[in-house]
Amino acid sequence: MCGGLIGAPLGARLTARLPERLLRLLFLGVLLVTGAQMLLNAVFSRSQTPSLFPGPSLTDPILVVLLAFLLGVLIGAWSSSMGMGGGILTIPALVLIFGVNQHTAAGTSLLVMIPNTLVGSFMHLRQQTASLRAGSIMGIGAFFGAAIGIWMALLMND
């Protein structure tokens, strides 16, 4: 969350400066890479997902905090500039780097995105690169969709 508070305003400013075509290509690239990674994990799933820092055996907490903070800055900037980050970047980072299970990664991702969303949205509204009306209407639907999605996710295994 802390890293995202730094990254989100940077990403919003970046969006206003990058050409539309480049933003679309970056968005597509992240979807393809993340989709391929998640597909490979699902097809070749193991009982334990290998991770850089598996939960119980953290050897250097300072390194883990620093890495988590830097990932937060990156994810905050990326989510604010691309409009994505929670599921696309945060969940794979939590699963692959920190060894968090899929359910915990999904819930943690939503928590991480709260400050990113607030700061990024404010910046986008301020620079007129967001629609408050469209966002509000979609947000109402997303509220109910999130409740249904959480219920469905808890019925499934990792």
Image: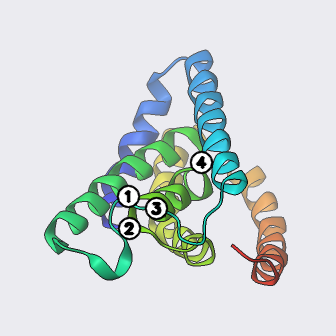
- 7 or 127, which lies in front? 7
Cα–Cα gap, marks 2 and 4: 15 Å
Point out the tag, 3 or 4, that comes first from the N-terminus.
3
State the residue at coordinates (55%, 48%): 125
Amino acid type shown at disc 1:
Gly
Amino acid type shown at disc 2:
Met
In this rendering, is residue 141 above or below 133? below
- 37 or 114, which lies in front? 37
State the residue at coordinates (48%, 73%): 100
Q: Which residue is mark 1?
A: 4
Asked if marks 2 and 1 touch (Cβ < 8 Å), the reply is: yes
The label shown at residue 1 is 2
Q: Which residue is mark 4?
A: 84
The crowding category of the residue bearing disc 4, from other C-alpha atoms within 10 Å (few below 14, some 14 to 19, many at least 20), is many
The crowding category of the residue bearing disc 2, from other C-alpha atoms within 10 Å (few below 14, some 14 to 19, many at least 20), is many
- 111 or 44, which lies in front? 44
Q: Which residue is mark 3?
A: 50
Q: Tell me, yes or no, if residue 126 can be seen here.
A: no
Amino acid type shown at disc 4:
Met
Asked if marks 4 and 1 touch (Cβ < 8 Å), the reply is: no
| Residue at disc 2, secondary structure | loop
- Dividing the picture into quadrants, the one containing residue 148 is bottom right
Cα–Cα gap, marks 4 and 1: 13 Å
Amino acid type shown at disc 3:
Pro
The crowding category of the residue bearing disc 1, from other C-alpha atoms within 10 Å (few below 14, some 14 to 19, many at least 20), is many
